Amino acid sequence: MKTVKVNTIALILLGVLLTGLISVTTPAYAQERRYVFVGAWPYSVPPKGHFNTFVTYAITLGVYLQLIQEPLAFYIWYNDTYIPWLATSWEIKGDEFIVHLRKGVVWHNGDPFTSKDVVSTFYCLFLLKSPVWEYIDKVTAVDPNTVSFHISKPSIVLIRYILREPIRPYSTYGNFSDKAIELLDQGLTWESEEIQSLLTDFRNYRPKEYIGTGPYMWTGEITESEVWLKKNPNHWNAKNIKFEWIKLYNGETPVVTPLVLGFKVDYATHGFPPATEMEFYKLGISVYRPPTGFGPAILFNHKIYPFNLTDFRRAIDYAINKTENAYVSLMYSAKRIAVPSGLPLELEERWILPEYRAEMTDYSYDPEKAAALLEGLGFEKGEDGIWRTPEGEPLEFELMFPAEFADWRAAAENVAAQLTAFGIPITLRAITFTEIQPKFVREGDFEMAIQGWGTGNPHPHFSFYQAFIYYNFPGYAAPGYSYELTREIEGLGTVNLEELVYDCAEGFDVEAQKELVSKLALAFNKDLPMVPLWERYGNNPVLSGVRVEGWPPADHWIWTQLLYSDNPVVLMLATGLYLKPVGWTPPPVEKPVVPKELEEAVASLESAVESMRSNIDTLSSSIEELNSKIATLSDSISGASSTASMAMGISVISLIAAIAAIVLARRRPEE
């Protein structure tokens, strides 16, 4: 049996823990509410926004979802441990990953939380072809508080896939998970017509209620501008939850910026441009920079010539000054990517073997190398300064970007300016952030797009899945960016990238995995399925002393939590660590209700103890009196020198002591 350990910080946190229809309404008496935490996250209001938190346009509220629908555990980046949450422990036994659930947890509607909820969650993920099902093939409720995941491919990443997934209620999704289990038991596969039909129904499903087990619950108070969450009084950790309300403003950076500058937001995760960040400093608003593990990249549509040519993609990378791009986008919160590996900078040193690192290409700004690569493909630069294909067609493209992401907008504008100056004119097209992926990138209806690379997860598998597989959109009948996953790659020959992505996480021996991780990093570097521009770090405004106090200093371990995948503020709000409302005082400790019989027994015991103290006092007085008489006797015989006389005196003393002991012994039973 192999047990996944929880160590020091986990124990500290555990110590803290132990001491109808969608309605759209305006918050009632919001101005009278106290102990409010105010954040911000973009969302779509009903009817477009909905409560199926598995699919697009759900009102998940981003990082704040796990305050409503909780995971089995929280992850601590500082020391690579998990904090038990809805699960109390877990272990690997043979080919099973066993999870033991916390007892006494209830859903917001009063239903008990059981293993059926966990099973239902993961069979819904099966319908969506979640990567976790590359490593498991069955989920079973052993008993109401125990779940077994049957391991089909042993892998260290299945632990994170399982423990960090928000758990949804069986009462909401059970019809779909039960049907999926039934079809699988009939021997059908995911590709079968029956399961695909069920998947379609599942994507279109719109629950009537939004419930979780979390410390905060849906109130139905949602408008175009804000949404309110209320503290769950029945939460198993309610006594440690200090904020009574959470208010989240709706909107991306342009909407949220004036709210932050007006001291109306306590914390925001948006990407703010350098000029805005300087305004924060002037107003005394702190800026924190936790890592994210990802950043913007130029995504190519590989169906379109010449994006299907590796050397053309390399030329694009050389032609962009990524140091400049990073600075104009996020100043100190962006680090350029000169030697792309597909991995966040935090993981490269830990995972990529030196011999592979030595073979990787540095794509630092070099327009001459870019020009040489294009010329090697037969392209020529015309007298008008525009590059042309061998057929004489001018190179000019459209670059899409999410309109509301201020940092990505700046990156796109700078890329367009640099490539246009290089001789490849770029037309910019801003698409609302909720539409760019589902309507354009997923459907293959784009030429170039600013999209994310990397993921905020501790194992390289997740970032490589993002780089090679995610944008092909498995689980959708859509082309995505159409990147072929079996291909010839310089220095590696024919490579099946999909197999490598899953194989690099196989087993529990990290050292053995580094070879495949390094191979994937080299493949990304040489083939460049996308061009990463920079890695983003948070430039998160933090307002102290207005509504919230207790913010840890910038060098505290809590800020090593990745901004979006394991958000530090969500961790503090959920556990009750550090943060507290201004003016908050601990609630008075209620006197426990004691049964009458127990009260009488305690009173009797207290009386007996008092009597014993009295007897001890009496005995002490008797001993003092005896000592006095012994001293007098000793003086009277001090002149006697006879041994016999001395012996007689000692005998008398012993006789007196014995008589005193007998007297006291006879009194004790009566007491």
Image (cartoon, helix red, strand yellow):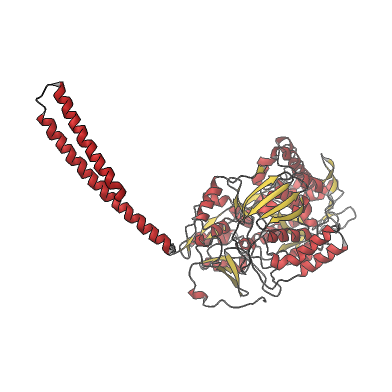
| Quadrant of the rendered image containing residue 104 | bottom right
Q: Residue furthest top?
A: 642
Image-based side of 83 in relation to 552, left or right: right
Residue 171 appears in the figure? yes
Indicate the position of residue 602 as horizontal and vertical percent values: 38, 57
Image-based side of 377 in relation to 277, left or right: right
| Quadrant of the rendered image containing residue 403 | bottom right
Image-based side of 643 in relation to 215, left or right: left
> Which residue is nearer to you in this view: 402 or 187?
187
Indicate the position of residue 663 as horizontal and vertical percent values: 24, 43
Q: Residue furthest right?
A: 391
| Quadrant of the rendered image containing residue 369 | top right
> Which residue is nearer to you in this view: 549 or 82?
82
> Which residue is nearer to you in this view: 374 or 567?
567
For the N terminus, give its image quadrant.
top right
Q: Is residue 299 above or below residue 511?
A: below
Image-based side of 45 in relation to 523, left or right: left
